[in-house]
Amino acid sequence: MERLSTTTFIPDTFLGARDDFSMQMGVIWSKIKAPLIVPLLRITVVLCLIMSVMLFIERLYMAIVIVLIKLFGRKPDKRYNWEPMKDDVELGNSAYPMVLVQIPMYNEREVYQLSIGAACGLSWPSDRIIIQVLDDSTDSTVKDMVELECQRWASKGINIKYEIRDNRNGYKAGALKEGMKRSYVKHCDYVAIFDADFQPESDFLWRTIPFLVHNPEIALVQTRWKFVNSNECLMTRMQEMSLDYHFTVEQEVGSSTYAFFGFNGTAGVWRIAAINEAGGWKDRTTVEDMDLAVRASLKGWKFVYLGNIKVKNELPSTFKAYRYQQHRWSCGPANLFRKMVMEIIRNKKVSLWKKIHVIYSFFFVRKIIAHINAFVFYCIVLPATVLVPEVVVPKWGGIYIPSIITLLNAVGTPRSLHLLVFWILFENVMSLHRTKATIIGLLEASRVNEWIVTEKLGDALKTLTVAAKLPRKPRIRIGERLHLLELAVGCYLFFCGTYDFAFGKNYFFLFLYIQAMAFYIIGFGYVGTFVPNS
């Protein structure tokens, strides 16, 4: 039998049209490549290399500071006056400062008992502590359960207040601000804040309050987070690696050098006088905690970070929850930078070096450059150089600096060093959302003030795990699992990888294919804990 040609099934007119289209595209590409694409890509490469160097210097500086801290033992209790609180026979319990403990929550069905129980279990003179539950829940059932839990602890002699309001204006900042208006707060000296999934140890106040009592210049004592579900899935392990670096290095360096860092919004104790002097809680951005910290710092207040005190909490274990969280954490700082940069420059109470630290290191490099460079350079520009071989990225910028930065980031979580490659791929994917959120914050575009409370599963995970093993009728909801941006970038990387495989000579396609697969896996929703439909 004679071999059938393609013309048997495809008319000549279609083949001609296809060839003609390919030729036209080739002509257009050749026309714009030399005068437009090549110069533009070269400029972008230079900008990305500059950003990489900025990040490298920042990471190296922080690494040197951490080494010096370890060598010279500059622990907080040596840099500041710290003495344990002592009983006074004459004054009795009035010798102890009045402490307010705030727990803001919103429909926290799964974790409200954990946080309220931990706060009520704090060891401190019972007549010198007030537990304030700020419930913004819109679910009436959850509201009733939280109120009942507060009543249960009140019956045990705990001084606990259940506070609600008739709106959610300002979200968390609005709730905290409203809570500070209560008459009984006027008698309090300090306020400890814990989000709904945080569980402090009973001696938390005994270890933190002395720093504030004996050092009148300190406004904030921030403690470290300890993740109870870090081993739940690969995504929570990746989060642990990123956050451990933040606490182990960034917070420690800020505390030890300029006595400034961003308040993490929870697991910290504030001097109420400092909050009031700084202007109180503001809801102009989605990072009300960072906003307050910057304003307090500009008033001359100091912050101290205690890495040896760890407070249990939960990492978001679903990709949806993590994505919303990262949008808020990336968009908020960029928007706050836009709003406060001139105020920081004009401030006369802090030194020039502290201004440079806040504007350049804290905001510009860590909150803006870090996100934009991770996505633009490694996911857009480097792959584009495969299609435009006239543009060459030097090895020091494309390999050496990224490798050193990655290793410096990994020191925070030694137990996860074997997951370093997965962490790089995951962080590159998440840089897509962080870059998008950063640009929204800088431009103050739509979604700039979007606040979606991070979903917490608490002990419900055990129930869900058991339920997932039971036979059930499959329910496929494609719209809930597909993430089109990730899939689009994955297709771009796959195309660049295929082009490099066909025409390249440096095996760059290996990285492009692997990174494309990471985008596909997340794009199709196969990351994090999958919560089965009930």
Image: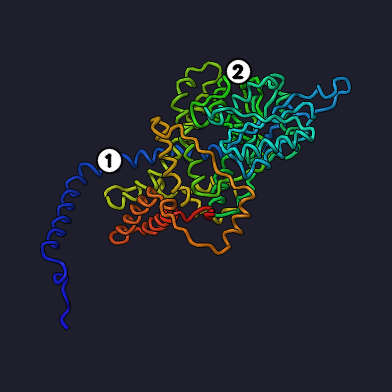
Q: Position of residue 187 (x, y in %)?
A: 72, 20
Q: Mark 1 sits on what residue?
A: 40
Nearer the observer, 390 or 154: 154
Report the number of numbered marks.
2
Split into 4 quadrants, where in the image is the N terminus?
bottom left
Nearer the observer, 93 or 117: 117
Q: Amino acid at mark 1?
A: Leu
Residue projecting furthest to the right: 89
In this picture the colour scheme is rainbow
Disc 1 element: helix
Residue at (34% x, 54% y) in the render: 491
Split into 4 quadrants, where in the image is the C terminus?
bottom right
| The image quarter in which residue 224 lies | top right
Residue at (72% x, 27% y) in the render: 99
Q: Mark 2 sits on what residue?
A: 277
Q: Position of residue 17 (x, y in %)?
A: 13, 58
Neighbours of disc 1 within 10 Å: few (<14), some (14-19), many (20+): few
Q: Amino acid at mark 2?
A: Glu
Neighbours of disc 2 within 10 Å: few (<14), some (14-19), many (20+): few
Q: Position of residue 341 (x, y in %)?
A: 46, 24
**Left or right: where 39 falls relative to 206:** left
Nearer the observer, 429 or 526: 526
